[in-house]
Amino acid sequence: MKILTLRKRFSPHFKNQRSPIFAIFLFATLLGFLTLNTQAGESASASRKNVTLRVAGLAGANPTAKDTAEWQVVQAFNKKFPWITLESAQGINVEGIGDEVGPLMMIAGGIAPDVLKLNFHMMDGYVRQGFLYPLDSFIAKEEAKDPNAYKDRLPAQIKKTVSRTLPDGTVHYYALPKKLLFSGIYYNKALFQQAGLPMRAPKDWKELEDFSRRIKAVVPDSYGLVLLKGEQASWHLMNFIWSAGGDAVKEIAPGEWRAVFNSPEAVTGYEFYYKLIQEKLATQLDEQYLSLSDPHKEEKTAMTFGYIGEILSLDPNKWSFGPVPVGPTGIRGAEVNANLYGMFAGIKDPDVRQAAWEFINFEGSDEAQRIRVKSFIELGNAAIVNPLDLERYGFSEYLQLSQPGLVEEFKEAVKTAQPEPNGKNCDVAYVEMTYPLDQILGDSDISKDWKAGKKTEVREEIQKILNKAVAETNERMIGIIPPQEMHKRRIVAAFVVFGVIFAFLIVGGFILRTFHAVGVATARVKGKQVYLAWAILAPALLLMLVWNYVPLVRGVFISLLDYQLLLKSSFVGLDNFAIILFDSRFWGSMWATLQYAMWMLTLGFFTPILLAYLLHITPRGTVFYRTIFYVPALLTGTAVFVLWKEFFGETGLMNSFLHLLHIPVERAWTDDPHLAMLSCVLPTVWASAGPGCLIYLAALKTIPEEQFEAAEIDGAGFFAKTRDIIYPALKPLILINFIGAVIVTFQTSQNILLMTAGGPNRGTEVTSLMIFYEAFLRLKFGTSTAMAWIIGSILVGFSIVQLRKLSQMEFKTAK
Amino acid sequence: MSFFSPITSRSTSIRWVYLLVYIVLTLGGLSMILPLLVTVTGSTAGGYDAGAISFFPRFLVDDQEMWRRYLDAKYVGRNEMLGVSWGEEKILPSKSSLPANPPDEKKIQLWEQFIKETNPPQNFFLLGFTRLNNKEAVYYNREYVRWLLKQNGGSLDSLNAAFHTTFATTRQILPPIVDIIGPFSPPTPITLAYEAFCKTVPLNRKIAWNVGNYYRLFYLPVKFGWDIKAYNAKYHTSYATFSAIPFSPTLPKEAADYWTTFVKKTLSTRFIELTVEGEAVRKQNGMDKATFIRTIAKPEHLRVSSIDTLFAAWAAKHGVLNAHIPQQDLDYQDYLHSKGFWKMQFITQNYMYVLNEIVFQGVALRNTLILIVLTVGGALIVNPLAAYALSRFKMKQSYTILLFFLLTISFPAEVRLIPNFLLLKELGWLNTFAALVVPGLVNGFSVFLLKGFFDSLPRELYEAAEIDGASEWVIFWGVTMNLSQPILAVIALDAFTGAYGAFMFALITAPDPKMWTLMVYIYQLRQSVGPAIVYASVILTAIPVLVVFLFAQNIILRGIVVPSEK
């Protein structure tokens, strides 16, 4: 009971959110009535006040064909709705983490756009967190005018993805598609010609293998089929799984989803992927290479999967497009995707909401689509326009410019294509599917059996890996944990939380004891002076209380909640702890933290000490060297890492330097699993050696000269003097600095965010960076706070030693 | 200084130790300085030299290098364009040598006269120094933006209003993409403005789109694998090089199939005119020109009307046969006339770009300065006041209060971060300076440190001041603060460094571009530009720190707080 009342006090979000909105709505309606009455006779649109609509990713900046088309759509919108001023909503772009977190960061940061850009797999999470405003009333109004208004814009498979069933059983629409995209295969005309292949996409898997093999025979360094690597791999893998008759997730009951990518069909899909890689018919490349902006990589790419929306995404002079190859089952597993627009639920002003609706509705309308197609044609791009659109919007005379056969292929794609997993809790299904893929590709047993031709064993091994992965996915992503298992986890969590509390209590008691021993009672002040003292202290005390103590208490409660930014948070007990303690990624981040700490506490910590020692024993040039080593301190921490990220680049300073030494490193250090952690450490070592050594130099200067002289007379040599004079003089300083360094190192996230952003493959994602991502980029405040407590309880022991040492120290500025 | 006495210093083994120490220090020192030299040099690089390790910008002293740098920047980093424009086979800006002869003024005069008389459209030229890939902030990109802003009210908002655009930063304003091949956009208001701007640029800084040269020196060689023998064998000709192949504006007999595909499928339609017969067929079919050319037009219907063919025809009328556009002479003329100007440009261009972004058009520097003033000012008032109260008035709770301050050091920073962020959000302080300043204003350790210092001040001073009847404020300001300048300087310097380097917390609590601090801005900039501009931005951010350090070097050296055991 007590917890509940406290929760209310510390979390204003528990208040019913609907009442103010409702009141505003009522007020606005009332106002609307008043204006209607006073301005009778004037049209409704004239009485509407001008509003500014913030839209994410508004086009119109670059003079490319695509942007010009979008710009013209915006112009038409401006003309049609003069009371709406469009503004491009901009936030922070966090490099290396994908652009899907952008809107979430903007929502958290209080600069959410009114119109959100979404895709299928983001839908569920957004609806569950209450970020999207239902569009039903708007759609109903339009449908009242024209019953078929959304017949073509919302085909059956899309209708299901943009609508959600709420817990009360009602179905609501939360987004409208701007444009549907269909996946297919792009092929390189030049390479096909060189290999003497027919000018069409491979029909089935057999042909895909065959084509790739024949191209490799003619152009040995060709990539063959290029497939995405890392967390994006599934967007390509899925084409095989669907074509084999499998699926990623399945709805077993309304709203109940399960991962099913361990079915025999899915195994066939994974197996085929494995075969392509194993026989070097396909190459996995990072997303950045797949954008084919590098002509050398483009030349070597024979085929790759891609989308076609209103236009082809690759240069039609070099590339042609065909449907996804048919699998052994005769199924063609194409994907349909879409750019969706949704309305932000946090809009307070009904006029802005109306404006947002007008924009969402207009962007996907036939009117806008016609403008786009017309713009492409005017720019001379008719050959790459989706042929179905050419037909639909009355530009059939341009159809002869289209690639032959594209129309038929498109029609088939529209019929058979499926959307990516987007059911309840399925938002990261694709990412989950890449973990077993990487495992299969790297498994030595599978590779051995494959080479020995033991096909059944290979299948069995793949099956085994997938079974495990599916169980993990169901648990991690969908949250299906057997009650017994959950019970066990809660007990473990309880133990851990108890440990955390215990650690803090012990430490608290320790502090009080330590400091009471030191505290000396002095003469007291009386009367007016007491008030004066408190008055002077008040600002600092208040600030300290609000920004240090209150957050700590509140942090306790947040770690016990499923914290929601816009909706009501619910109490989940110790489940947040139970989740992270059994999350392998959390422990992976702890391992990364340890690695980082090892580097920093050796290389990073002892370099300044060594430098100070060297500078101290040199007879001449101390000031000169000290100045030189201090120069990097002119750069602030962020600038240091921004600079070194360039140095660590593929053709940057470090690789050029290694090249001189005949050590070839082909890729950027930040992308190399072995060098990535070092790349996060070296810039700090470089920048902090000089500034860091000053304090040790100052301490060394306080050693009385006579000590050295006396030692000399005693016959002490180089090592004896270092051991007997230098080391004792620095020891207390080293100790206290080391403790400080431990605490700082375990809390570092900025340097890693700037350098590798946690990559490659989460190899450098330390726990504090994971907390940052989970909290501010994915808005999982509950679990991230629980993680923070665990890290905090590990460090609290160090803190107490630090505090104790501080209390025993005197602080003087060096003379 | 005194580790070894002068006598022992002379022994051989110690000399070896010294030698070793100096070698280590020198290598370490080089590893400090060389990356910074690479940074400074790199900030003046641009195209082909962007990734190279160089400790000095060679183009400053080497004319050959300067000429290459000039060509690379002028030809927008497009290697094939140089040969096509000069009429030479396969030459690269990074490999070309200074012309042997001075520019031929006669040829240039003829060309200038032609331009004056015929006044060809601006899209027959590529404007030099307009690199589009953000590798360097080239001159005419920046000039274009400046000109555009000047013409349209001076601010980005007024420009957006004038052109109905939604540019969020000036960085997004780029010259339109035009090329010799591929589609060509019909004019929009902003492309018309661009053409008006092009008119203000001297002729020798533009590059004529030479269609004939493109055909014979790039289009055909690619088709024939750069082997003239293959071409000769196919058409029974005997050209020595591809550059000798003639280009006819109308359908030729030789290589008619290649000419037809080139003109019908590849060449931009702005360089193609229809013959009278062709125009009639187009009208019959009710097609626009571009579609007609790309679809049903017969090659006989088409005539190439590009600036090189027009010039050749015009020159023939004026008695000069086989006239070619003197592009190399024009380039060399500009190079010789404005060498100093372009050197200065290459040195400063990336800096000017970043400065424009953070100072003149952007708000990053302004935000950071405000933040520094608020943070340093706040830290120098709130912390000393608390320490003063604790030091001067011996209250019963003094010790508890000090502990209350000091204890916060041991609080887990991450646990604090999330609730603090949520509190700022609930207060509506996100994207304000309050969010960046208030949470970190009081520092437990600073209060602790200051109290210790204030305690060490002589009591007699306070007593004397009290006897003089000084108010509490006068005592605080005149005595305590006055005598504690070294430690206050340390605290101020820390506050400055913290505010100037504000990144992670600023990233979360002030993500609105209007509130970006310098470091957040640099982080965002790095994602969209090449190394040269990144280097320039890094150097620029170091300058304020350098200034502060120069003024405060005594504080840095003397204000180091060294703990020692009591």
Image (cartoon, coloured by chain):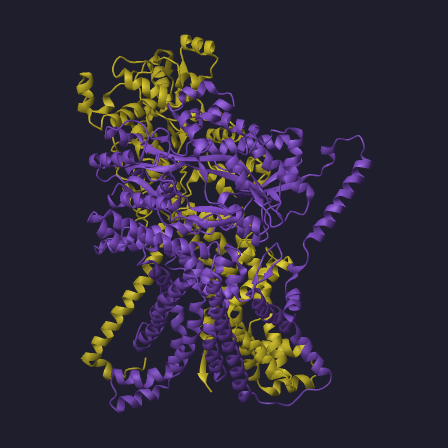
Chain colours: A purple, B yellow
Q: Report which quarter residue A288 is drawn in.
A: top left
Number of dots carrying numbers: 0
> Which one is in front, A354 or B133?
A354
What is the x, y in percent for residue B558?
46, 75
Q: Is residue A416 above or below residue A630?
A: above
Position of the C terminus of chain A by quadrant: bottom left
Residue lying furthest right in this view?
A38
In the image: residue B370, left or right of residue B523: right
In the image: residue B471, left or right of residue A92: right
What is the x, y in percent for residue A450?
23, 48
Q: Is residue A482 above or below residue B223?
A: below
Q: Is residue A514 above or below residue B226?
A: below
Position of the N terminus of chain A by quadrant: bottom right
What is the x, y in percent for residue B430?
60, 56
> Which one is in front, A242 or A339?
A242
Q: Is residue B376 visible?
A: no
Q: Residue at x 61, y 80 (%)?
A: B401
Q: Residue at x 36, y 52 (%)?
A: A466
Q: Report which quarter residue A170 is drawn in.
A: top right
Q: Is residue B301 visible?
A: yes
What is the x, y in percent for residue A379?
46, 26
Q: Is residue A577 above or below residue A178?
A: below
In the image: residue A757, left or right of residue B149: left
In the image: residue A525, left or right of residue A179: right
